[in-house]
Amino acid sequence: MTFPHGSAGDPPSEGSTPEDHIAAGPTRREQARRQVAHRANVRVRLTLAAVAIVAVVAVVVAVVIATTNGPKTPVKATTPNSGLSGTALATVVAQLTSVPAAAFDQVGAGTALAHPDVIGPAGGTPAAPALTLAGKPELLYMGAEFCPYCAAERWAIITALSRFGTFTGLASIKSATTDGAGSQEPFPATSTWTFRNATYTSSFLAFTPVELFTNIPDQQTGGYTTLQTPTAAQQALLSKYDAPPYIPSQDQGAIPFIDYGGKFLSVGATYDPTVLQGLSWAQISTDLHNPASPVAKGVLGAANLMTAALCELTGGQPATACTATVRSLESRL
């Protein structure tokens, strides 16, 4: 797939760094966020449109041939755990989910390019009803396995949420290299995780992930094969809040989409995925424990800003997550 308006999705100019975008103030940060969201936005909209077209064609064909026994296009099963398994998987997950508070605090906002935005008058938008599940604030994530921006954001999500609870069932995958039309993806084969079979347990929060598409190219649509279907309520949230006035019109429909309890909203990657390029799951997880590494500055910086939003939802609990450093970041939201 190709992108219209390529200049809107171009990476920072030669010689610039993520720090440059932070230092340049809100305007540059907004531009950076639009850059990382816009590319995923176009792909998802084109993929969804193609899926819809194929679905309509399939219905028409089914009516014409009037049979349920006609030939079907084979769909390969994904292998989300193909990268790591057994002891290797357990070791990396343990390292990923046990980053010490001291490392988070040393990084602070790091090289994060964006932060969760307030939903409501304080953020210049209409207020939204609280999003809860089982009496707890709910974090709703909607993304896709092919998406390189989702690939980057999952590292921050997992490290942030691990301060409030426990993950099980995480599986390693890589973002896509080429789509169903044969077009090259940005940040190809980024090492990441899938939430497709993951569960999350916390006394403070509920986490609901939806992986819309696999990382398997679909030649029929030019995109990727579908994976998880959002509920009507989840689709309604995506349709309402992944659109103006909550986000710029050019980013409408972009993923990853994250709703923080109806109080905060994040669309697109919040740090530069370049810091993950060419690194294995083990290398990234190791770097997260080194606050001076580019990986830690990006991932943990983004995670700290996520944590600041989550601490607003939990009333500052637990104290092990909602540290003085994290609470100091709440003023940036």
Image (tube, rainbow, N blue to C red):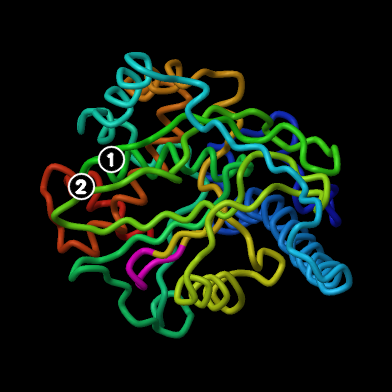
210 left or right, relative to 103: right
> Residue 111 at what x, y percent from top left?
47, 37
Q: Nearer the viewer, residue 323 or 286?
A: 286
Number of labels in the image equals 2
- Which residue is depicted at the point 55% across and 31% down? 79
- Which residue is depicted at the point 83% across and 51% down? 220
Q: Indicate whether residue 277 is drawn in magenta.
A: no
Asked if residue 139 is positioned above or below residue 74 in the image, the reply reads below
Check disc 2 and report its element: helix, strand or loop.
loop
Q: Which label sits on residue 212?
A: none
Tell me the amino acid under the disc marked 1: Phe
Asked if residue 157 is positioned above or below residue 309 in the image, the reply reads above
> Which residues make up the magenta segment?
260-265
Tell me the amino acid under the disc marked 2: Phe
Q: Indicate whether residue 262 is drawn in magenta.
A: yes
> Residue 297 at what x, y percent from top left?
42, 31
Q: On the image, which quarter does residue 157 sit in?
A: top left
> Residue 309 at what x, y percent from top left?
31, 58
- Which residue is depicted at the point 24% across and 63% down? 312
| Disc number lying in front (2 or 1) | 1
Q: Which residue is mark 2?
A: 164
Badge 1: how crowded within 10 Å, few (<14), some, or many (20+)? some
Check disc 1 and report its element: helix, strand or loop.
strand
Q: Nearer the viewer, residue 117 or 79?
A: 79
Q: Which residue is mark 1?
A: 167
